[in-house]
Amino acid sequence: MATQTKPILHGYFRSSCSWRVRIAFALKGIEFDHLPVNLIKDGGQQLTDQYKALNPMQQVPAVQIDGITLSQSLAVIQYIEETRPGPRLLPADPKKRAQVRMISDLIASGIQPMQNLYVLQKIGAEKLQWGQHFIQRGFEALEPILKETASKYCVGDEISMADICLVPQVYNAERFKVDVDQFPTIKRLNQTLMKVDAFKLSHPSCQPDTPADIRT
């Protein structure tokens, strides 16, 4: 599908969900404009009436593309898979495609939301232990699944939406001081993927809104 203007990504440098979209855009070779939404500054720019009109859930990302606004990262990824050329993000084989969706949903629904900033603010002083618990629990489920599905990447030998979800979650695990060495398949896959340009260029350490003190 042709597009007259570049997509606009409203996101935050360290947001897992924003990072997923950046990876997908990079893999597909899609140029986009980035409008930062600082989740911390001024009490959280995502909470403004202006941003709420764009994304009623007041979360990032929100993506304006082809005259519509999409506000869930997996919906964005599947939309560009269906409308843009480039490397497949979902396998052609129905069984492998189902495995990719299973792994993606496990991460995007079962692990990552527990480290959402809004949730952590409600938890308060115990937020580190809270985050560790749910990442550990999720990785204990994910590791044996990946042992069955993985080859070079999460499902077989082609990068997919599952890999797009995995790398930001490993980054979160390291932020929350989870020992990733316990999960050798997850660790190996992450190390392999972080050698791919699309994952490196979309990393939180090198985004337009990355603070200077952590920029690389």
Image (cartoon, rainbow, N blue to C red):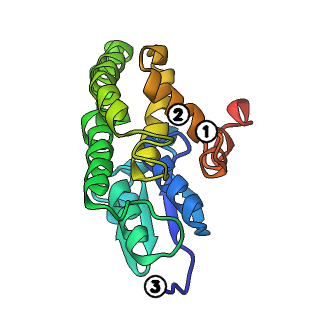
Q: Are marks 1 and 2 in contact (CB under 8 Å)?
A: yes
In this rendering, the answer to whether 187 lies above or below 93 is: above
Q: Amino acid at mark 2?
A: Asn
Q: Is residue 177 visible?
A: no
How many marks do you count on the picture? 3
The residue lying toward the viewer, choosing from 193 and 40, is: 193
Label number found at residue 1 = 3
Q: Position of residue 112 (x, y in %)?
A: 34, 35
Q: Amino acid at mark 1?
A: Met
Disc 2, SS: helix
In this rendering, the answer to whether 98 lies above or below 4 is: above
Q: Mark 1 vs mark 3: which is more N-terminal?
A: 3
Relative horizontal placement of residue 214, taking residue 40 as reference (left or right)? right
Q: Quadrant of residue 169?
A: top left
Mark-to-mark CA distance, 1 and 3: 30 Å
Task: Tell us which disc is closer to us: 3 or 2.
Answer: 2
Q: Position of residue 177 (x, y in %)?
A: 48, 15
Q: Residue at x 42, y 20 (%)?
A: 183
Task: Tell us which disc is closer to us: 1 or 3.
Answer: 1
Residue identifier under label 2: 190
Q: Residues within 10 Å of mark 3 (few under 14, many from 20)?
A: few
Residue identifier under label 1: 194
Q: Residues within 10 Å of mark 1 (few under 14, many from 20)?
A: some
